Image: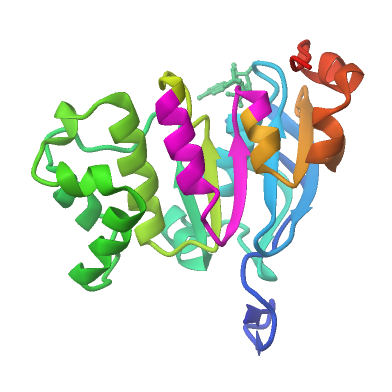
Amino acid sequence: MRIDQTGTRQHGTEPGLLEVSDLRAGYGATLILEGVSFTVPPRGRLALLGRNGVGKTTTLATLVGQTTRHGGSVRVDGVELGSLSSSARAAAGLGYVPQTRDVFKSLTVEENLITGLKGRPRGALEEAYSLFPRLGERRRNGGGELSGGEQQMLSVARALLGQPTVLLLDEPLEGLAPVICDQLMDALSKLEMTVILVEQQIDRALAFADRVVFLDRGRVAHAGPADGAAADSALLERHLGVSLAA
Ligand SMILES: Nc1ncnc2c1ncn2[C@@H]1O[C@H](COP(=O)(O)OP(=O)(O)OP(=O)(O)O)[C@@H](O)[C@H]1O
């Protein structure tokens, strides 16, 4: 189902269409994004890549209303997010897992998850434990007692309990051991929603995504299929300064 700008529900269309158009935003008067545009279809997976400081985190933070917007538009299923509050954006379908991992260290795993229920019945917690069995085993442990990987699972699981149609993930693999990265990517690959993934592990990001956008100094420098990009060492070298091992 899709809701257009007049609030009319259009049946038969899957939710999760994200349309970003000429987005200009930054911090106070400082402009970081200088006209970013891309579209992700329902259930589409976009890898948002680029060198350090090009505006990847700022793009995600702008989508959830945490920066100063100077212009452009962001629409989820046809609804303009404009100057909506962060909670209204969540209600429109956005879920956000920030780079800092949103875990309350003084609460237990289960209490952390409950904060993500947003009015849903407690039984919905089983969705989180089914996706990440490790969280079920540690449900009575404090958030501060968790390993980095468990904290990341908790942060992702909490966002998912809000039933987003568009999930924004900012460097979820940062600092995690390879085996934990495997587990997390395995869980993420089962998700049936639109996902934007910002990630430094380029090979994993491109294997997960179907499309890629490279940012450079607050603008889209290249957009295209993810598998084509993974095989194009000149492209990776140009936009990231790296190439993947053959
Ligand atoms: N809170 C802030 N206030 C002012 N400037 C900021 C703030 N956060 C980020 N910036 C600046 O915005 C620019 C883009 O940063 P951003 O974090 O979006 O880049 P990024 O592509 O995510 O980089 P990285 O890969 O290093 O995380 C940088 O010049 C950064 O210094």
Q: Would you say residue 30 is visible in this rendering?
A: no
Q: Residue 123's spot in the image, x, y percent? A: 21, 70
Rendered residue at 8%/44% (across/down): 140
Residue 17 position (above or below residue 53) = below
Rendered residue at 91%/17% (across/down): 234
Residue 83 position (above or below residue 239) = below
Quadrant of picture, ligand 1: top right
Numbered label tally: 0
Residue 60 position (above or below residue 90) = above
Residue 162 position (above or below residue 210) = below
Rendered residue at 47%/56% (across/down): 85
Q: How is the image coloured?
A: rainbow
- Whether residue 218 sits left or right of residue 188 in the image: it is right
Q: Would you say residue 5 is visible in this rendering?
A: yes
Q: Quadrant of the C terminus?
A: top right
The magenta stretch is: 179-203
Q: Magenta span has 198?
A: yes
Residue lying at the far top of the rendered structure:
241
**Within the image, what quadrant is residue 179 found in?**
top left
Q: Residue 240's spot in the image, x, y percent? A: 76, 17
Q: Quadrant of the N terminus?
A: bottom right
- Whether residue 161 sits left or right of residue 84 in the image: it is left
Q: Residue 4's spot in the image, x, y percent? A: 69, 79
Q: Residue 150's spot in the image, x, y percent? A: 29, 34
Residue lying at the far left of the rendered structure:
140
**Within the image, what quadrant is residue 120 found in?**
bottom left
- Whether residue 115 sits left or right of residue 160 in the image: it is left
Q: Magenta span has 209?
A: no
Rendered residue at 77%/22% (across/down): 217
